[in-house]
Image (cartoon, helix red, strand yellow):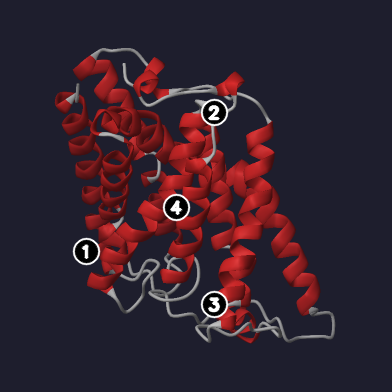
């Protein structure tokens, strides 16, 4: 049976706090086309923990059902490693297709990266020690290490709410409807920042629609991994790995991609993540870790 009280409470708290904070930042002049000021970056990072706060407040003071539903457990280490390896491979396919389809060109000399660093006060052209290959190698290794770990901490702030609480609450609707609805809601949650240039600069309205599509596509993989391994901590690690790749080497190497069509947020990225998610969804759960939709609803 659908727990409307819990769902509406969680969503009301999550959206109210998020929109209030981000609305205040936007009214103060925050824009995402360029690097936001440090206070804006810190506030946006903090907002990633709003879904976790909403989950705590809903369970503690509204539904009083206990935290078992959230699958707050680490589980086996194997899916963490598998996801960490899959993420750069998926991004390589996405940006390889983006390049092949003429939707973006790699900046092998990192010209735009140097310009960005120069604007931030770092003269990347001084001396002869700048090596594009070394910068890309460091960015790649950093994204693999920092993504699932440090970024994963902030990713867990979101996933404790989206995958830990809301996903099992929506599962009585059936897997397909639950996945689509969660993707749409997750995308709309990002709407204020998209309006000022996040992920889809220059496309405020189409960007919100695209974000709902992207969140739905990548959400299939996240949902399946969470249900399969019964771990919202794993979901946070995967979310962090995704952000680590997105804000790491690929953004440096492909700085000028139409965000609606190419790259991870565009149609190419959606298609690749949809294929990965559907492939995983069609696989049978291993007997030792099986979990069904009904077992996720308490």
Mark 3 secondary-structure assignment: helix
Q: Which quarter of the rendering shows the C terminus?
A: top left
Within 10 Å of disc 4 (Cα), the crowding (few <14, some 14-19, many 20+) is many
| Alpha carbon separation for disc pair 4 and 1 | 31 Å
- Comparing 110 with 43, the one in front is 110
| Disc marking residue 27 | 1
Q: Give whichever of discs 2 and 1 has the lower sequence position.
A: 1
Q: Residue at x 40, y 67 (%)?
A: 199
- Comparing 107 with 97, the one in front is 97
Q: Which residue is mark 2?
A: 229
Q: Residue at x 43, y 74 (%)?
A: 34
Q: Give whichever of discs 4 and 1 has the lower sequence position.
A: 1
Mark 1 secondary-structure assignment: helix
| Alpha carbon separation for disc pair 2 and 1 | 42 Å
| Disc marking residue 98 | 3
Q: Give whichever of discs 2 and 4 has the lower sequence position.
A: 4
| Alpha carbon separation for disc pair 3 and 2 | 32 Å
Q: Seen in the image, is 130 located left or right of residue 45?
A: right
| Alpha carbon separation for disc pair 4 and 3 | 17 Å
Q: Is residue 50 above or below residue 214?
A: above
Q: Which residue is mark 4?
A: 218
Q: Are marks 4 and 1 in contact (CB under 8 Å)?
A: no
Quadrant hosting residue 217: bottom left
Q: Give whichever of discs 1 and 3 has the lower sequence position.
A: 1
């Amino acid at each position: 049976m659908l727990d409307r009280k819990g769902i509406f409470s969680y969503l009301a708290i999550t959206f109210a706090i998020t929109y209030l904070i981000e609305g205040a930042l936007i009214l103060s002049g925050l824009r995402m086309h360029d690097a936001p000021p440090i206070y804006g970056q810190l506030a946006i990072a903090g907002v990633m923990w709003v879904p976790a706060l909403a989950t705590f407040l809903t369970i503690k003071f509204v539904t009083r059902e206990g935290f078992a539903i959230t699958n707050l457990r680490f589980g086996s280490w194997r899916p963490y490693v598998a996801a960490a390896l899959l993420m750069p491979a998926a991004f390589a396919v996405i940006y390889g297709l983006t390049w092949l389809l003429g939707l973006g060109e790699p900046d092998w000399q990192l010209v735009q990266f140097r310009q960005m660093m120069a604007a931030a006060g770092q003269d990347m052209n001084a001396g002869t020690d700048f090596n594009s290959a070394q910068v890309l190698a460091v960015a790649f290794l950093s994204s693999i290490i920092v993504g699932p770990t440090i970024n994963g901490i902030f990713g867990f702030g979101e996933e404790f709410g989206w995958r830990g609480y809301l996903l099992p609450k929506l599962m009585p609707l059936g897997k397909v409807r639950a996945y689509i609805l969660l993707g749409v809601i997750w995308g709309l949650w990002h709407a204020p920042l998209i309006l000022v240039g996040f992920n889809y600069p220059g496309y405020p309205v189409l960007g919100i629609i695209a974000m709902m599509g992207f969140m739905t596509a990548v959400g299939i993989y996240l949902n399946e991994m969470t249900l399969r391994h019964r771990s919202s901590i794993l979901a946070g690690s995967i979310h962090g790995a995704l952000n680590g790749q997105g804000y790491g080497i690929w953004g440096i190497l492909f700085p000028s991609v139409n965000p609606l069509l190419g790259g991870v947020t565009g149609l190419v990225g959606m298609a690749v993540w949809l294929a990965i998610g559907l492939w995983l969804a069609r696989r049978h759960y291993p007997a030792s870790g099986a979990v069904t939709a009904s077992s996720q609803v308490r």
